[in-house]
Image: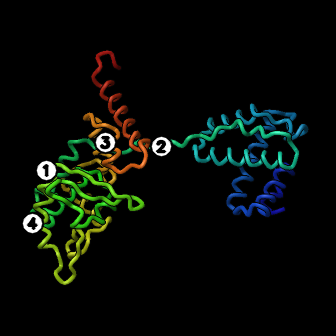
């Protein structure tokens, strides 16, 4: 018996935690969390069911445990915390069943709460237009590069890591497509529009030759001011500089641009499958998150313009 379990009110909880330590090799953090969770359950049952301490764990029903889970929700615990507490209760009752204290596990009725998936962040088409126009206010090879970079990010929805590893041979300006290497080196062909193509052509013709370091040649498509490959951090800093220059208040990152093109395409009638292929999502479920953004936008528009809306 450890010091952390000695003060617990129930011997079976203490035995269970010692079992986790000795036979499951659980970490001290897990044991401490389970001790707190099961102690909370014990006191809840003690308060709600006065006969519980005498009748013991065999008298606990699924309805009692559902009431405990509802209590956790009312207390405002995060879904991740409730998930951990539910896991602790399930494992504890399975241990009691294994020790033949109970004949069946009443905790099987508990449902694991689904974590809230945050909606993808997208910015307005107007803010994107202001961002894309920002490099036009500057001169020099870096301004030409920045315009090509921003146009490509918004045209393709590529991840920042995918843009950073783009090579000269990956871009086909005759077909307006490029070879993109995504997660786990999965390759996909990505199209881009004519405006982006012209920006890329201007970069290759007028800017990249001035940026490249002849003593350290590289086939990286986008180069930094020293002639080396443009990194993920460098791309992020370029975006932030032009966001400030354009006076845009919205938070814009490479990933926000990725979310934005998906949202804007769907809003204008693009097919989910087409957006999935463009972004390189493995499952359609990932792409379907953007429909929630569209629905939120529709609700805002409805509330703003419907004559009977308050």
**Residue at coordinates 59% horizontally, 40% vertically from top-left?**
113
Q: Nearer the viewer, mark 2 or mark 3?
A: 3
Q: How far apart are labels 2 and 3 at the CA level?
A: 23 Å
Mark closest to the chain's N terminus, 3 or 4: 4
**Residue name at image x 62 percent, y 35 percent:** 74
Residue that badge 4 annotates: 205
Q: Earlier in the sequence, mark 1 or mark 4?
A: 1
The residue under label 3 is 274
Residues at badges 3 and 4 in contact (C-beta under 8 Å)? no
Q: How dense is the environment of label 3, judged by Cα within 10 Å: few (below 14), some, or many (20 and up)?
A: some
Task: Determine whether the residue tagged by mark 4 lies in a helix, strand or loop.
Answer: helix
Q: Where's residue 47, x and y in %?
A: 79, 36
Q: Name the residue under label 2.
A: 117
Q: Distance between the residues labelled 3 and 4?
A: 32 Å
Residue neighbourhood size for the residue with mark 1, other residues' Cα within 10 Å, grouped as few (<14), some (14–19), many (≥20): few
- Residue placed under numbered mark 1 in the picture: 195
Q: What residue do we see at 33% from left, 29% from top?
A: 298
Of tags 1 and 2, the one toward the viewer is 1
- Determine the residue positioned at 28% across, 61% down: 163
From the image, state whether disc 2 or disc 4 is nearer to you. Answer: 4
């Amino acid at each position: 018996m450890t010091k952390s379990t000695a003060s617990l009110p129930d011997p079976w909880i203490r035995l269970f935690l010692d079992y986790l330590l000795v036979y499951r090799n659980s970490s001290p953090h897990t044991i401490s969390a389970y001790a707190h969770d099961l102690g909370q359950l014990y006191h809840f049952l003690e308060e709600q069911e006065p006969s519980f301490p005498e009748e013991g764990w065999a008298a606990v029903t699924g309805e009692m445990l559902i009431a405990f889970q509802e209590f956790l929700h009312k207390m405002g615990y995060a879904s991740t915390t409730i998930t951990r507490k539910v896991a602790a209760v399930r494992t504890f009752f399975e241990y009691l069943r294994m020790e033949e204290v109970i004949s069946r596990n009443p905790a099987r009725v508990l449902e694991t709460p689904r974590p809230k998936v945050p909606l993808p962040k997208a910015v307005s088409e107007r803010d994107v237009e202001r961002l894309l126009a920002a490099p036009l206010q500057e001169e020099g090879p870096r301004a030409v590069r920045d315009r090509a970079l921003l146009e490509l990010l918004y045209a393709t929805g590529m991840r920042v890591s995918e843009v950073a590893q783009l090579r000269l041979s990956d871009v086909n300006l005759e077909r307006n497509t490029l070879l993109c290497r995504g997660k786990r080196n999965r390759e996909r062909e990505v199209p881009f529009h004519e405006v982006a193509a012209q920006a890329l052509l201007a970069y290759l013709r007028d800017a990249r030759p001035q940026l490249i370091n002849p003593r350290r040649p590289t086939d990286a498509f986008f180069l930094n001011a020293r002639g080396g490959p443009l990194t993920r951090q460098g791309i992020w800093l370029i975006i932030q500089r032009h966001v400030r220059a354009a006076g845009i208040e919205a938070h814009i990152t490479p990933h926000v641009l990725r979310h934005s093109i998906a949202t804007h395409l769907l809003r204008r009638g693009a097919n989910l499958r087409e957006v999935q292929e463009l972004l390189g999502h493995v499952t359609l479920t990932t792409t379907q998150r953007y429909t929630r953004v569209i629905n939120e936008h529709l609700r805002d528009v409805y509330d703003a313009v419907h004559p009977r809306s308050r």
